[in-house]
Structure formats: structure tokens, C-alpha cells
């Protein structure tokens, strides 16, 4: 919880600094169509467009407005399909080195594997129904986070049915799941 509070402090400070930023004299414009394209089907933002978003409060506000619209549209689809995107401990498969957990609504599974070197591998597997909803949004990021503030995975969706990463925390992920609830967020 301490790291989350610290991150929130940095976020507030950074937001305050950006809020005071003035529009540059020679500001370029990124159209709403291009912003939507970069946030959904791609291609993503080029270097110059990324600089424009950081330099221009107007472009940044348009970016945020469109991003919020996209996230609202995805949330509406989740509601329509009765997805709540949470996982509480329900073991479907278990061995000494591998476990699979299923989300409460069947929208995803989480595989946890122990590698030969002792590291843990986390694999998020999306259901066909969830893939159908997200297929038009390959540029979004999926974040798996628990109710204690630990981020399990955060990656670009890119129309992949499986996203995999190494476990980045000291505790055993299976032990963490005994008391934690996981949430799948769309960023």
C-alpha cells in the first residue's frame, strides 16, 4: 500500500505541473481521427506525435477525451456481456510447479508456472468472448492488478489471446492469490 500512496503523490504532482503548462507558440495539431486510430487499431503514435501530446495541453486534453470515450465503450460491452473481470481463488488445475486459475465470469484464466531457475511465469489467457470484444482495440493495454496494489501484468493487448510475463514480486504468486482478488483493467 505504501508504494501505491507514493505513486499517487507523484501522479498528483505530475498532474499539477502539466495542468500549469502553457500551449507552445508553434503547436501542431493531431486530428481526432488520428488520435482514435492510434488508440485503437493503430498504428500507434510516432515519436513526433508523442512529443506533441506531451507539449500541448490542447492535444493532451483531446487525447484524454478520446481515450475516455474508448474505455467507456469497452466498459459498456463488458457490462452487456456480464463480465466483471475479477478472479478469486478457484483452482482448475494444479501441480507442484503449475497452477491455473479461472476468472469468476469465465472471461480469462491465469496460469502460474515455476521455471527451472526458480522464477515464476504469469500467463493471462483471454476467452474467445473477451477477444471478440477487444479485437477492435489492439492498441489498448491490459493490466492485471490485485486488491493489495500489486501489478501482476501490464502489456499491450495487440490482439493476442495470451499475454505472458515474469513475476516481479518477492512473494510466491500462489500464496498471494490465497488472500488477494485480481482485477483485469483496460488502460
Image (cartoon, rainbow, N blue to C red):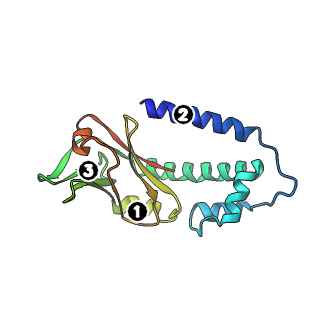
Query: 161 or 55, which lies in front?
Result: 55
Q: Quadrant of the N terminus?
A: top left
Q: Residue at x 28, y 53 (%)?
A: 110
Q: Which residue is mark 3?
A: 102
Mark 2 or 1, nearer chain start:
2
Mark 2 or 3, nearer chain start:
2
Question: x, y (%) of residue 153?
Answer: 39, 51
Quarter of image, res 104: top left
Q: Which residue is mark 2?
A: 8
Q: Residue at x 67, y 53 (%)?
A: 63
Left/right of residue 184 with respect to residue 102 in the rendered view: right
Q: Considering only vertical position in the picture, is 29 above or below 178?
A: below
Mark 1 or 3, nearer chain start:
3
| Mark 2 or 1, closer to the camera | 2
Q: Which residue is mark 1?
A: 131
Question: x, y (%) of residue 157?
Answer: 45, 61
Q: Residue at x 77, y 50 (%)?
A: 58
Left/right of residue 111 with respect to residue 147 in the rendered view: left
Quarter of image, res 151: top left
Left/right of residue 125 with respect to residue 59 in the rendered view: left
Amino acid at each position: 500500500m505504501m508504494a501505491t500512496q507514493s505513486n499517487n503523490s507523484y501522479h498528483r504532482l505530475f498532474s499539477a505541473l502539466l495542468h500549469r503548462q502553457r500551449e507552445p507558440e508553434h503547436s501542431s495539431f493531431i486530428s481526432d481521427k488520428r488520435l482514435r486510430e492510434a488508440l485503437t487499431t493503430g498504428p500507434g503514435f510516432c515519436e513526433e506525435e508523442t512529443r506533441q501530446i506531451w507539449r500541448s495541453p490542447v492535444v493532451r486534453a483531446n487525447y484524454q477525451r478520446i481515450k475516455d470515450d474508448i474505455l467507456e465503450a469497452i466498459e459498456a460491452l463488458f457490462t452487456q456481456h456480464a463480465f466483471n473481470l475479477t478472479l478469486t481463488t478457484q483452482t482448475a488445475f494444479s501441480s507442484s510447479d503449475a497452477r491455473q486459475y479461472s476468472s469468476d465470469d469465465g472471461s480469462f484464466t491465469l496460469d502460474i508456472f515455476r521455471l527451472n531457475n526458480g522464477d515464476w511465469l504469469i500467463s493471462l489467457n483471454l476467452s474467445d468472448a473477451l477477444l471478440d470484444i477487444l479485437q477492435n482495440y489492439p492498441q489498448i493495454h491490459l493490466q492485471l492488478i490485485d486488491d493489495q496494489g500489486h501489478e501482476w501484468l501490464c502489456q499491450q493487448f495487440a490482439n493476442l489471446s495470451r499475454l505472458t510475463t515474469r513475476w516481479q514480486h518477492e512473494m510466491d504468486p500462489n500464496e498471494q492469490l490465497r488472500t488477494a482478488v485480481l482485477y483485469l483493467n483496460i488502460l
